Image (cartoon, rainbow, N blue to C red):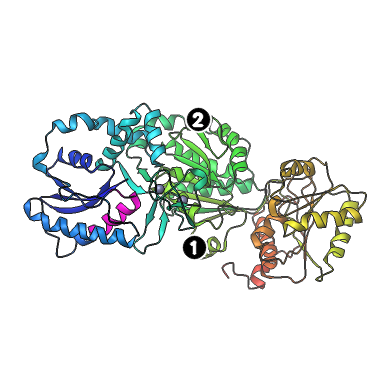
Amino acid sequence: MFHAYIVLTEQGACAGYGRSPEFDWAYINASSRADLAVITPPVPVAYAEAVAREVERRLSGPSLRRVQSGRACQAAVRSCRRMARSVLRALGSSGSAFLSASAIWRSSQFHPDMLRNRVPPRELVLESAQALGGRSLLYEEAMRALVSAGLSSLDRAQDLLAAMCVEGNASLVPAVSISPLGTRICNRCGSTGPFVLTPCAHCGRRACALCCECRQMGFARECVPLYLVGRGNLVHSHAEAAAERAELVMPHVLTAAQKQAADMLCDWYVDGSAREALVWAVCGAGKTEVSFGAMHLALLAGRKVLYAAPRRDVVAELAPRVRAAFPAASCSVFHGGSLGPRDFGADVILATTHQTMRFYRRFDLAILDEADAYPFAGSEALASSMDRALAPAGRLVIMTATPSRGHLARVDSGALPCMRIPARHHGTPLPVPEVAAAPEGDSLRALASLSRASVRSGSPLLVFVPRRRQAQEVASFLSARLPEARVEWVHSQDPARDEKRAAIAEQGCDVLVSTSVMERGVTVDGVDVIVCDADADDVFDYRALVQMAGRAGRTAACPTGRVWFLCNAENWHIRTAIGIIRKMNAEARTRGLLAQADDGAPPTSGRMQRDGGRHGR
Ligand SMILES: [Zn+2]
Ligand SMILES: [Zn+2]
């Protein structure tokens, strides 16, 4: 539990809060004289913060601006306590808990001996701040981190944290704050809800607010403090040693398209004018290696690099590739299932976007891969965690095959530099989807005839359906119509989905009916793709359609494939998806990035423009 208090010095008064006001008073008095008056009984840290904020506002107002230490402060203390009581009552906290009128520590009572027992030496405070630098830690995590770094015993860790806050090396905030409007906000993940009220063993209350968004990362509650530790001079003191570890070994020669994008990204990094850059690569173009050049430049300057992706399997798959490219640099992997010790001081950190909420202003360069993938896309909380993990002058590279409308609008307006990779490594254009009419109530017949043609030509087939229940229905329909084909189905709740993913890739089945769970991370030689109900725009937006179409023609062995969008009526998303694919093919052709001539589209393919499809509509 925490107390709000006011500190009175010769310069004036200010409000604050802490777990142990007496300690804070003693620590402040070691350098300058100050009185400290406690103004609340023990309350959850979010309440103490809310009181301190309101009182601070009162103190900076005209009536109390000139309050100073000494006897004249009594009236000010009484006024602040009245205000504290009214804030606590408004927050629904009973003001009946005991608070003695004499809970004031005078600077005249201070004696240096008081510090000897409790206050840690300054060097230890600085060393601890370095050890936790660039991190965001819940109370328990901070305690454990200090103990496991050998800086403190468990019983002393609390004072060490308090000293770091008073010294300004760390800031203490409630994990869940109460805003001036009375709403709650999670200071760890940035979520503004939902919060649940649950009985809490930490504060002993029956209803303590807990953030639902980040609960799988440990409970962020309104009674739990969160420590945000700036990285201080951590980076610069180790920059030279880090630069020596910055050797880059490219896994293979980049294609012309990759090389152009990689060079532009390096120029953007050196130039330093725009904070963000977008790498827009077609599905299967190989974006990862494109970022290695900029990462190398950052490491050479002794900077800290983050490579983040929304999904755990992507991070796990990337880790060995990044390690192989930077063999001398220290590299640590953070995801829910990662094994082994986590090295918060590593040169390169690979993490799921969820794990980025463990960092605070740490990274100079962050690469966000698959920025359009669930759960990152559309999550305000993950976007703000990512933002906070960046140092104030940090730079962000967003990599995606399907930029959001917001990103496209910023590219169009020139606010966001964009590096496009319009061609795949094999230089064959992307298969352009064909729209097949499937009148309502009769779509299965159209599906059956398209599937039959595909299966007879010997191609494996991915059939996408918008809803989970349809996966099994459509699969049994197809296996009745195509007795010669092995038909499987899968959706996100299917425990065997990884085996089925492998089965279609290794020719263990001919037709896989799936929800959008297979829209990423599947590469099948020579696969054809059918999207059923492609006009179901509540599920399939243009980004999902581009991703699903992007399953076809990925491998050099079979660089072509066919894609059909089955729909009752062609909608904006279908037109936009096809427009994006055509536009990328046209750009690849213009830039001379294609190995063979034509994909059947007119050379100045500008369907997006013809349809008035400005991205940001
Ligand atoms: Zn949260
Ligand atoms: Zn609690």
Magenta segment includes 53:
yes
Give the crowd class for mark 2: few <14, some 14-19, many >=20 residues within 10 Å. few
Q: Earlier in the sequence, mark 1 or mark 2?
A: 2
Magenta segment includes 574:
no
Residue shown at 19% from the left, 42% from the top: 25
Quadrant (top left/top right/bottom left/bottom right) for the C terminus: bottom right
Q: Furthest-right residue in view? A: 484
Q: To which quarter of the image does residue 420 belong?
A: bottom right
**Chain part drawn in magenta:** 42-57
Which residue, given by chain and number where applicable, does mark 1 sit on?
414
Label 2 element class: loop
Camera-side residue: 481 or 8? Answer: 8
Drawn side of residue 488 relative to residue 212, left or right: right
Camera-side residue: 403 or 110? Answer: 110
Q: Is residue 309 visible?
A: yes
For residue 341, the mark is 2
- Magenta stretch secondary structure, dominant: helix
